[in-house]
Image (tube, coloured by chain):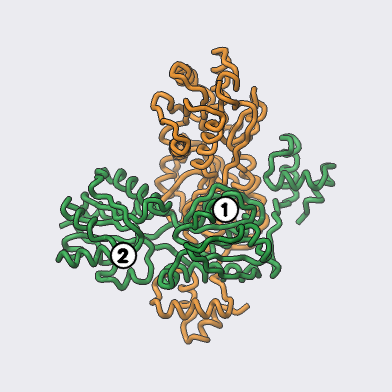
Chain colours: A green, B orange
Amino acid sequence: MSSVKDIAEKLGLSVSTVSEVLKGSDVVDSETRQRVLDAALELEVSARHNTVHGSSCKICVFIENMGFEKIEQFGYEIIVGFRLAAAERGWEVDIVPISLNEKLDYVYDEYMRKNGYSGGFLLGFFLHSDFHRQLQDTRIPTVVLDNLILNPKVACVGVDNHQGVTSVVEHLASLGHSSIALMNGEGVSRVAQERYMGFKVGMNKCNLPLRKDLIAYGDFSSENTGLPVRSFIENGATAIVCASDYIAVGVLRELDLLDLRVPKDISVTGFDDIPIARYSSPPLTTVRQDRLSIGKCACLTLEQIMGGMAISRFLLSPGLIVRQSTGPVR
Amino acid sequence: MSSVKDIAEKLGLSVSTVSEVLKGSDVVDSETRQRVLDAALELEVSARHNTVHGSSCKICVFIENMGFEKIEQFGYEIIVGFRLAAAERGWEVDIVPISLNEKLDYVYDEYMRKNGYSGGFLLGFFLHSDFHRQLQDTRIPTVVLDNLILNPKVACVGVDNHQGVTSVVEHLASLGHSSIALMNGEGVSRVAQERYMGFKVGMNKCNLPLRKDLIAYGDFSSENTGLPVRSFIENGATAIVCASDYIAVGVLRELDLLDLRVPKDISVTGFDDIPIARYSSPPLTTVRQDRLSIGKCACLTLEQIMGGMAISRFLLSPGLIVRQSTGPVR
């Protein structure tokens, strides 16, 4: 394979001009740009980015706001996926836990540079607000799970939340349900917003009305589902779409207290397919996030950002897992 | 590096069980799954997918519904990016043009298999409806530009349209504009819908009202902008956000006919940053799509799907390019 230098020589241009064009930059005039691209195709010289390889590359994975149980249920496999993909590339990986309540006494960029990190991966259900602000201006290649930051150096990875909830609604509609409720997590969370949008689109696709009395916000845990569940039942819901498996487990408990049988009296769905989903009673119909792939995906995305590509979002396809918590409408 | 076989031997499991776990499949019970992942981490055995390498891999790039001018302005660099990334992987690439009006007399999967293609990349502003339907069920790894298909074998690549238009609105608001109009493309197109959503979110972020009398749909060309432009002016618009550079060029022409000066009397923005954007009068403030990177991204995504990953969307960060068509509100 030829090199950037060969193109430069062939066209009588500087190596840096050729590199700029192949990096996708627009500072070079159209005509020169066109000549470089034609030559690149002819010589099969690729737009090689300075992809970092070898043990000199060290990545920091921050785990934020996850208790031990959540790490085990959710975060563990993402980290395994990331570490395996990093090992393939010869990268070193440090895992650093951060508490949500801890005040950051350093600046993100400064911390990363001081410790020799080439990139970061931030894993947490919510982003520390100070961290969030800092990521808007960081120059360190960074990947965050499930959070959108408007900075070409920062990309989001995760599952397509929108698509996941839409497929759940379509599944319930196909079972004859029309009074479908949504028990969502915290309204300020981006994940909750996306899952709400997926719900709205799904209801719309199935020609079902979006009823305000069948939508509630709470948190992503299994607590605090009592009041909304009672209100959903009073308002005639025959199915409850939950924005997480934890929420669904709480909903199942409330329905049990009300002597309602799942799925005979009412259907319930979760989201995430964490290990508890298959051991709940009844086992949950839910949306699977392939956590190993999310981790691998995060590594791949980080590699591209470090190579100069500006990535906004890399989203995996969710999978609908039908278990026993959904059935035909009563 | 150790192999899948080493893990299987170490744990007394079959190679296929270990492979299933490392592929992210959930058919293996939790406890075994956990033991495999722990061993994989310890031995640094990665979840290697059967990534296709070598000249045996042949990819078909379909170019749909693009006239010669559009190919030159928009599609060319995407194809160059794709071909360069494919060459790096030793893949063969065929380019096949398809007309929108042509009736498909073969089934996509059948066509791909018969011709020995391992994957496809579909490039076109609209997807042929029959093609669209076929892609919902295809088992051939496929990447489409700017269109969402609900099938784990099919991924979407493109720029984050939503984010792009939001940044344009924020730019105009920072110049004092509050009566901002949107001249969109065809309402049925996914790109138009996403650009509308980005507009809505941008106006909302800037605390500006979304006015129905300042929103119009047409097509992505430079024709047919006359009526909406006149109506925008009558309704007091001081800036017009256009969903493409072609539309913006048409809008500039209409404003010229009305003797309005850009940006002194009214600001105009485009989207895409195709070559004509910098040569229009005045040069357009627009949203840049890095087309070389989109092509590379498509190749990378196809490689991952062929390796077994279920990808929904891979979106690049758009870049706001400020030129002379925007200025402070009059």
Q: Give the x, y percent position of residue B11.
A: 49, 85
Q: Give the x, y percent position of residue B232.
A: 46, 20
Which sits in the foreground, B274 or A79?
Answer: A79
Q: Which residue is mark 2?
A: A222
Quadrant of the image for the C terminus of chain A? bottom left
Name the residue: 73% across, 45% down.
A20
Tell me: residue B257, above or below residue B305.
above
- Disc 1 residue crowd, few under 14, some 14–19, many 20+, Cα 10 Å: many
Q: Amino acid at mark 2?
A: Ser
Mark 1 chain: A
Name the residue: 60% across, 65% down.
A60
Q: Secondary structure at mark 1?
A: helix
Quadrant in the rendering for residue B176: top right
Q: Which residue is mark 1?
A: A135
Which sits in the foreground, A77 or B187?
Answer: A77
Q: Is residue A7 left or right of residue B122?
A: right
Name the residue: 41% across, 30% down.
B209
- Disc 2 residue crowd, few under 14, some 14–19, many 20+, Cα 10 Å: some
Q: Which mark is residue B102?
A: none
Q: Secondary structure at mark 2?
A: loop
Tell me: residue A14, above or below residue B116.
above
Which sits in the foreground, B202 or A20?
Answer: B202
Regarding residue A321, the answer to whether it shows in the image is no
Same chain, labels 1 and 2: yes
Name the residue: 50% across, 54% down.
A129
Q: Considering only order in the chain, which callout, 2 or 1, is on the residue closer to the N terminus?
A: 1
Quadrant of the image for the N terminus of chain A? bottom right
